[in-house]
Image (tube, rainbow, N blue to C red):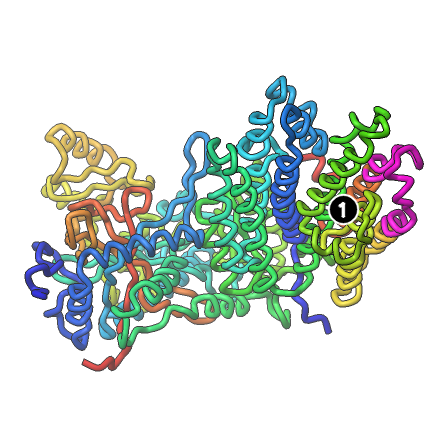
Amino acid sequence: MDVAAEDPFRGYDPGPFFCELDAARGGDGGAAATIRHRIAALGLAALRSRARAAETDLFNLGITFTVYSEANAIDRILPFDCIPRVITAAEWERLDRGVRQRVAALNAFLDDIYHARQILKDGVVPADLVLGNANYRSEMEEFPVRFGTYVHIAGIDIVRDQEGEFRVLEDNARTPSGVSYVVENRHLMLRAFPDVMSGMRLQPVDDYGQRLRAALTEIAPEGVLDPQVVLLSPGIYNSAYFEHVFLAREMGVPLVEGSDLCVENERVFMLTTAGLRPVHTIYRRIGDEFLDPTVFRADSLLGVAGLLGAWRRGHVALANAVGTGVADDKAIYAYMPRIIRYYLGEEAILPNVETHICREAAGLQYTLDHLDELVVKPVGESGGYGITIGPRASAAELERARAALAADPANWISQPVVGLSVGPTLCEEGIRARHLDLRPFAVTGRESWVLPGGLTRVALKPGSLIVNSSQGGGSKDTWVLAAGAPG
Amino acid sequence: MNLAPPLLARYAESLFWMARYLERVENIARLIEVTYTFESPGRESESWYALIRINADEESFSRRHGAADPETIKRFYLIEADNPTSIPAAIEAARTNARVLRPLISTEMWKQLNQFHRELTAIMPSELEGDALSRLSNRIREGVQAQTGITEGTFFRDQSWHFHELGRLIERADQTTRLLDIKFHLLVPYGREQPVADKREERRLAELTQWGAVLRAAGGYHAFRRVAPVEFSPADVASFLLTDASFPRSVRLCLDEIERHLASLRVRHGLGGTLAALEQAEELHALIAGAEMERLISGGLPVGGLHGFLDRLQRGLILLAAHIGTAFFRDWRPLAQEQAQAQ
């Protein structure tokens, strides 16, 4: 059989973008070439039938997220692409250090702004950006957290530009999700593509649950010998419920809802068949504002009355801490390279996407001069609201953006459009280039540990840069090659 | 030292109900099997209406459908998910509980239930016709049995297992009383008339055929044959289903098992609060041990005959479930009750 004649990679063209499965890239010990060869040998028909079976498997296993339409709840899988994304050992070594550095800076920053506020006094970050931020929690002021760790679980969104440089796009310091897919995607690949994986030396992803449980045990109140850890979920109707189940199971701890917990004498208990049992660490997957109806939103049914009081008394630990949202805000993101330098005396190992801060004269001038090349984002908003994408904007839209910038420069930042890297992806028309990003997950108790790889999201629509699952995104297994893997 | 992991009260309750609903699915399928076996030309509607009486659904059925015909009744139990006593409703409730329990149950249990749920919520009207119905009820029964087997083989045997089994056994005992009761609902019209002498033998044989069908639906026909006299009477059948010590669907065996699980919770897992439930199980034991089947079957004594007796058993089982719920599933502290009511 003439394999070359029906090479499924024939229509694959990364264009000007960096390819994550480039066989000519060094440092992979030939892994990319091997993977391409094996996938080509399987052929498109086999790839498709295995991919279909893999997705059915995901559905039957209930590895799904829930989408609500008017009348009912529909379980959807995150579309899975079976061609893996490869990260070399050297690339990972740098990503790992970069993520840990980032998390260290986020924690130092939070510790500072909720205590001495030195960085504000020194004028490195404008005080109003922090103190006027909707996610700033005055309840946190002067409150000590163990090891100074506020962000116990972080997800750092990283993209790779056309030159192959990894850049941080966004920090997620509240309740980042997606880690369950990292582990489940690996299991799926092992089941469905053992022949593609055969002999590949990959860094394992299986110990996330153990690492997480160890960190949550570390941060429990001092003096508790065998801390009871629980995962607090909004419940079975939450779209990320599967991930909560996954994490509770991997850690071997109860998944609780607010109604399972109560506070008595400023201590937290869970209601069991044997009565009340003390709880010492809560990994909460609900937002700050829902945690405690006596402190935040009074209408919250998800939280526990008195929880914050018990926390402030040091009787229970919360992961992540309250008030971390101020650190992963777009406004603060722009200052992250300076924040890293300020606390750690180091340059950022993983640079930001180039960001112009319009409250500063130079940033404003640059933005106005290059408006048609830049993405202009308001700092306060989230969810893509109020963004102007210069290259795609009409003249009128550009003028509106110009006026808005002039009226209130402090409300804006601008960034160039990043040409995200691509990976070969199984599409209707064959194997095609699709844009990717990467979200590594860091777990921090006393120290930080980063799960090798992370969630690779892929924009399945041709040309699209939007990898979100709500907008046609899927995911891939992320293979971090073991150090010293044979060539 | 107590190394046993604690069990959330909410999980215990969900286990109990997941098992109950699954057992119910199987038993509705069994009731349907026995009903179409009873279906005799010209009396189809009466046969199927017995199903409605057994489930005490007279009111809700007539509100939804008015007059009862076999096809409507089949749809009511096999397709209409918004009828709470239907198979789709029961499997939906079982799956919702399983969803709560996903951190606890095995992946294999969830996967099977998930697929089974999809199958049962997509039953087509054509599957209720002719011989298709027999295949469908077989498939439903086997689906639950597969689930039972997976559970037996994969579910961790800590205290959660006991709550699962308690739910399953209480439902099973309850459903056995209902299966037995079908005779009451079907034969009452005959029972009131005094058959003429030469019809008596014919009727006796017809009745035995029907009792045989009840035994088959309970999966106990051959076991019964091994222990029953050659010339068996209806009282022998009722005795077997209620008091046999070895038949897995007999009320007696369910009660034995229930007591064993309650005792395990108490002794092995140190859970107090089982006393009221244990006492109630003992009372039910005493009730069936003291029953005089011949007199019950021949009607009249004691009050209400067999139907009245089964009704007492059913009420006793409801009370048993309530005792378990009070002891383990809810927050019994007075303050918590007030708060719960205030919300």
Task: Write the residue at 41% across / 40% down.
Answer: A67
Viewer-closest of B31 and B313: B31
Q: Is residue A317 left or right of residue A266?
A: left
Q: What stretch of residues is rendered in magenta?
A: B283-310
Task: Write the residue at 66% across / 60% down.
Answer: B161
**Residue A429 versus residue B46 in the image, above or below:** below
Viewer-closest of B125 and A132: B125
- What residue is disc 1 on? B321
Q: Is residue A159 left or right of residue A77?
A: left
Assign a secondary structure to mark 1.
Answer: helix
Q: Is residue A254 magenta?
A: no
**Residue A205 versus residue A78 in the image, above or below:** below
- Mark count: 1
**Residue B191 versus residue A238 in the image, above or below:** above
Image quadrant assignment for residue A106: bottom left
Residue type at tag 1: Ala
Residue B28 drawn at (x, y percent): 63, 40
Secondary structure mostly taken by the magenta-highlighted segment of the chain: helix
Viewer-closest of A353 and B76: B76
| Callout 1: chain | B
Residue B198 drawn at (x, y percent): 82, 30
Residue A266 in view: no
Task: Write the residue at 46% across / 69% down.
Answer: A211
Q: Is residue A270 left or right of residue A143?
A: right
Residue A34 drawn at (x, y percent): 18, 72
Q: Is residue B308 magenta?
A: yes
Residue A291 in view: yes
Task: Write the residue at 56% across / 58% down.
Answer: B105
Which quarter of the image is occupied by the C terminus of chain A? bottom left
Neighbour tally class for label 1: few under 14, some 14-19, many 20 plus, Cα within 10 Å:
some
Which quarter of the image is occupied by the N terminus of chain A? bottom left
Residue A174 drawn at (x, y percent): 42, 52
